Image (spheres, helix red, strand yellow):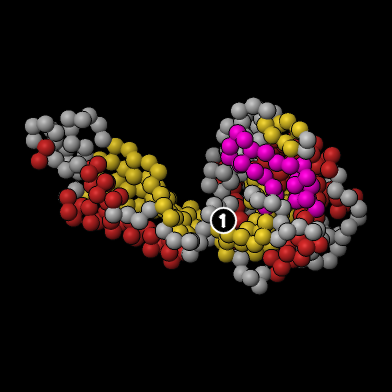
Amino acid sequence: MINSQRLTDTFLELVRIDSPSLHEKAVADHLCALLAGRGYDIHVDNAGTAIGGDTGNVIVRVPATGPGEAIAFSAHMDCVPPCIGVEPVLTDGVIRAAGNTVLGGDDKAGIAAILEALFHLEEEKIPHPELYLLFTVCEEAGMFGAKNLDFSRIKAREVVVLDAGGDVGTIIVRAPSKAGISVTFHGRSAHAGIEPEKGISAIQLAAHAVSNMRLLRIDEETVANLGRIEGGGQTNIVPDCVTLTGEARSQTNAKLLAQIEHMRLCCVKAVEELGGSFDFSHEISYPAMDVPAHSMLLHRALHACNDQNLTCAVKGTGGGSDANIFSGQGLSCINLGIGMSRVHTTEEFVLVEDIVKAARLTAALMQR
C-alpha cells in the first residue's frame, strides 16, 4: 500500500530544501542519504562540473527482484525562482507555499512519487525489473543536467518522466523542438539633427524585418517569438547597432527550420532595402519528442491508468522537458502528468491525493 503520510512528509521535506538551478547539492545530498544502505548503486555524475553547478545528476540503480527489461524513472531537482525559503502549508489536502515563493512541486512532487513507489514495492515484496532513478539538475534553465547525463550508466531503454502538469492520467507524447535565435543589425551612426541622411538606423532595420515576420502562433505545431530588443543610445544619434533575441518551436523539425529561414530572409530583405548588415544565428536547444502510437511503453502506461481507474489523456505540449533530451538519445520516453497546478507562479499548489495517485501509477509501471 502507498503510504500517503510518508509520501507527504517526503514531499514537504524536499520543498523546504533550497534548490535553484545550478545549486541543487542540498537536495542531491538529501536523496543520497535517504537511499543509502538499501543496496542500491548510487552515483552522482559530473554534470555539475560541466555546467558550472554545485552537483551532478543523481543516478540510482535498483537491482532487479523479478523478470523484465530495465526501466528508468526521472524527475528534476531544481526549481524556478523565487524558490528560496519555501515554507509549505498543508490545508484540507492541498499543499501551497506560505510566502511569496513557488512551492516546488515542479518537480519535487515527481521525486516524492518515484521514491514512494519504490518503497512500496520493496515493503510489499512486489517483484520488479532493474530500475534506474534519474534525478537531474538544471532542467528549468535548459535541461542542462539531462544534456550532460552519464548515459553510459543507464542500461534502460525506456524512461518515464514525471514532470507534466494536468491530472494524473495525462500522458505527454509530443513536445516541440526549440531553437534560440539572435539577430544583430548593424547600421551607421550619424548626428540625428544635423545629417541624419548619412546614417542607417539599426532600429529601423530591425523594425522593417520584424514587421514582415510571421510570429507567435504560426500553425498548430509551430510558434515563434521575439522576446527582447537591445541597442541604441542617445536620441540625437542614429543608432548603429541593435540586437533581437527570440525563439522558435515546432513539433516538426522541418517546420522549425522553415520558420528560422523565414525569419532570416526577413532580415535579408530589410538590409537590401535600407542598407546596413546583420548577423543571424540560431541554436537548437533540444530535439522534438514524438512517441509513436505503437509504443509499448505508451500502451503499458494506458493499461496502468485503466487499472488505476484514471482517466487517460494522451496529449502534446508546447514546452520542453528532460523527456525531449532522453528521446533525442534514442530512448523510448513518456512524460506523465502528476497533478501540479499553477507551476512557475507563487500560486502553485498540489493536492496530496494527486501525488498519491502519481505514486500508485509509478509503482504499477515499475512492475512492467
Q: Does residue 87 appear in the picture of this structure?
A: yes
**Residue occupying image coordinates x 20% and y 52%:** 271
**Residue occupying image coordinates x 45% and y 59%:** 222
Q: Where is residue 354 in the image (x, y as percent from the top left)?
A: 75, 47
Q: Tell me if 318 is positioned left or right of 43 in this view.
A: left
Kind of residue sitting beneath label 1: Thr
Q: Position of residue 85 (x, y in %)?
A: 65, 27
Q: Is residue 358 above or below residue 67?
A: above
Q: Where is residue 44 in the image (x, y as percent from the top left)?
A: 68, 45
Which residue in the structure is indicated by mark 1?
317
Q: In which quarter of the image is residue 36?
A: top right
Q: Does residue 62 appear in the picture of this structure?
A: no
Q: Nearer the viewer, residue 347 or 231?
A: 347
Q: Residue furthest bottom?
A: 294
Q: For numbered disc 1, what is the local secondary structure?
A: loop
Confirm whether the magenta stretch covers residue 144: no
Q: In which quarter of the image is the C terminus?
A: bottom right
Q: Nearer the viewer, residue 44 or 191?
A: 191
Q: Tell me if 205 is positioned left or right of 86 in this view.
A: left
**Residue occupying image coordinates x 54% and y 52%:** 319
Q: Is residue 355 above or below residue 269?
A: above
Q: Position of residue 337 (x, y in %)?
A: 67, 52
Confirm whether the magenta stretch covers residue 354: yes
Extent of the magenta region: 337-360
**Residue occupying image coordinates x 67% and y 31%:** 97
Q: Nearer the viewer, residue 238 or 55?
A: 238
